[in-house]
Image (spheres, rainbow, N blue to C red):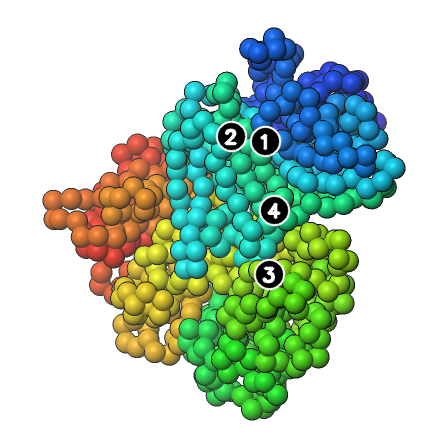
Amino acid sequence: MKKSQRISTAIAAMCAAAVMNAGQIKIETNGISMILESESGHTLDLCYFGEKLMNTTEFAHAWHITQPDTGDAYGLQLYPAYGGRFFLNPALKLTHADGVITTELVYESHEQTVIDDNRTATVIRLRDKIYDAHVDLHFLAYNDENVITQSVVFRHNETGNVLVENIASSYITLKARNYYLTHFHGTWAREMQLSEERLTPGVKVIESKKGVRTTQSDNSAFLVSLDEPAQEYSGEIYAGALAWTGNYKMQFEVDEAGLLHIVGGINPFASAVSVAAGEEFATPEMILTYSNCGRSSISHNLHDWTRKYNIAHGNEERPIVLNSWEGAYFDFDEDVITGMIDDAAEFGIEMFVLDDGWFGNKYPRNADNAGLGDWQVNKKKLPHGISYLADYAVSKGLKFGIWMEPEMVNPDSELAHRHPEWIVQSGERDMLPMRNQLLLDLTNPEVQDFVFNAFDGVLNMSPNISYVKWDANRHADNVGSTYLAQNEQNRFWHDYINGLYSVYKRIRAKYPDITIQLCSSGGGRLDFGALKYHDEFWTSDNTNALDRLYIQYGTNIFFPAIATAAHVSTSPNHQTGMMLPLKFRFDVAMMGRLGMEMQPGQLEGAERTFAIEAIKLYKELRPTIQFGDLYRLNSPYDNDGYCSNMYVSKNRGEAVVFAFSTIYHNRTQSYGIKLHGLDPNRHYLLKEVNTMPGDKTYAGDGKVYSGEFLMKAGLSLPLDNAFSSMVFHLVEQ
């Protein structure tokens, strides 16, 4: 039998086995099992979710409990609707065509399909006991990455419209003595600040109603640790993140029996949707993973999955970028930009990005109060056009990129005067500018065409444009649409995001090779829904290296270094006024996709030499940082004034260690760290790198150590002064 025939036979056998075993449904990866119990006409129950099981037969009804008031035995419904005896926050709330407000879902059928050697799709079909209403649960299991995604499709054939008032992407129930929730909050310049708390009886809600920039204040990503606070290398942890760029709601409810119910999906706020017979309503995906050995494995799972499946060009090294914003702001002309390109070339930088301020003629973009929407080159600033600058960059050995904010419009713009009906507006109420700009209505297909054509038009300015920074600097308020019907205004929140996704898909279809940065006042749009159409994200507008230690720490629990744009900026920092050593600033930025956000020509003498050498070094370390596994050795949240991370190549033959002191430590102290992820049986040459001239300080520099020694005994580092830092490169010998 040929290999292809054997594979086809195996796939057919797997699918057949799944259909035959209708009582128990297994959704599994190499390290995770989700076991469901189903019978035709009965509820679909969750029996187990956690570490991969060897034998699942005895897990049927493993988590069933009894209601004391009724004596009914009931399982943990995987996707409970409001109806029957269910008394918690439901996954689904409908009002049927005849006005009945309850729904009772029972199992109907399921099917499993092997997509390839790493992915298996499962569709479980539920129906209401009485009404012709159906819910399909879609799961996709990624074997090697230990990630399971879940989404939901609702449809019906009732005699009138059904009102969908709440529809979650997933509903997960956990059973433990205690639950510790890690979530992420902050605002502009303080994104992804980590907070952990023990969940108590009642409901903890994390949500956004901003519509745009929905992750700027709170992120939908979360960790739940069982029984004890989350540890880095031990303990059971579940992780989830909603792949949705709009309003979301995450609910964590500890019930009277001590069970934790996690419900996540589109925020139902002002979003009830009337669904016609034969129409489908689909939710975004919830991204789920599990680890029985701490947060580190959670990150490895999600980083591997993201690089392979959820960013563009995840297998390609990211270039070192010079962005013009903090170096020039709006005040530039051709000479300023070509001068920055000259400096970038001398420093070994690989990409120059022209930020805001290059467009608008009738309403020139000389500040943030005019020009948005008029995507024509400012002839006064740039008389030779974008093509001249792009060609100039390429002639110097650099690639060229450009900034856009295509979803927005200034009131002072030709676009706003030409198409006022394209602007988000709520009847006769005032339109409320933010950052002097308004929001275009992406529920409208004409506006979607405009945004696509604006992007297309800018790319057509030069074949040498290879990068676009896509920004979005406000959220949505006083929302409404002149396109949507009067009785469909509640569709705005999710139709806007689906319109945005439609534009993203069209752009990626036409420009599959372009690099696109995901930016929204920094990290205001950092979610897996938007990220899959982009190559990287702008982590925060705050480029202060000390703050970035915290921002990048939280961010990189879920999102990989390869996509984390981290730029070296000037001192004193433009956002905080803090003065930090250049080495410290470079060392922090090198833990992501390295870039610069300044006039590099202002660096002189030893600092200039150091920066050029640091960029050269990063190119050597880049494969390990961008494609390796991240191990967090010491959190900045530990409050001991230290922080350290390391990156280990997939073959464990190379590693990079970063260590930082953020406060003064007295002379009797030294910073001891034990490394992780190495092979205990191999030996590694340890070199201190990225040092200022004459400043090597580690006595073990140039020595060879076993992986066992480095992980069991570790390193003792002389990091005494505030804002001192060290970088080590380990190579197998």
Asked whether, in this view, residue 671 is left or right of residue 650, the answer is: left
Look at the image and tell me whether residue 612 can be seen.
yes
Badge 1 amino acid: Asn
- Residue 340 image point, x, y percent: 45, 79
- Residue 68 image point, x, y percent: 55, 10
Label 4, residues with CA under 10 Å away: few <14, some 14-19, many ≥20: some
Nearest the camera: 185 or 593?
Answer: 185
Residue highlighted by disc 4: 269
* First-in-chain label (4 vs 2): 2
Q: Nearer the viewer, mark 4 or mark 2?
A: 4
* Label 3: which secondary element: loop
Q: Nearer the viewer, mark 3 or mark 2?
A: 3
Label 3, residues with CA under 10 Å away: few <14, some 14-19, many ≥20: few
Label 2, residues with CA under 10 Å away: few <14, some 14-19, many ≥20: many
* First-in-chain label (3 vs 2): 2
Circles 4 and 2: CB atoms closer than 8 Å: no
Nearest the camera: 726 or 470?
Answer: 470
- For residue 478, the mark is 3
Residue highlighted by disc 1: 89
* Label 1: which secondary element: loop
Badge 4 amino acid: Phe
Whole-number angstrom distance, CA of label 1 to CA of label 4: 15 Å
Q: Which residue shows up at 71% across the image and 55% down it?
A: 489
Whole-number angstrom distance, CA of label 3 to CA of label 1: 28 Å
Nearest the camera: 478 or 322?
Answer: 478
* Label 4: which secondary element: loop
- For residue 66, the mark is none
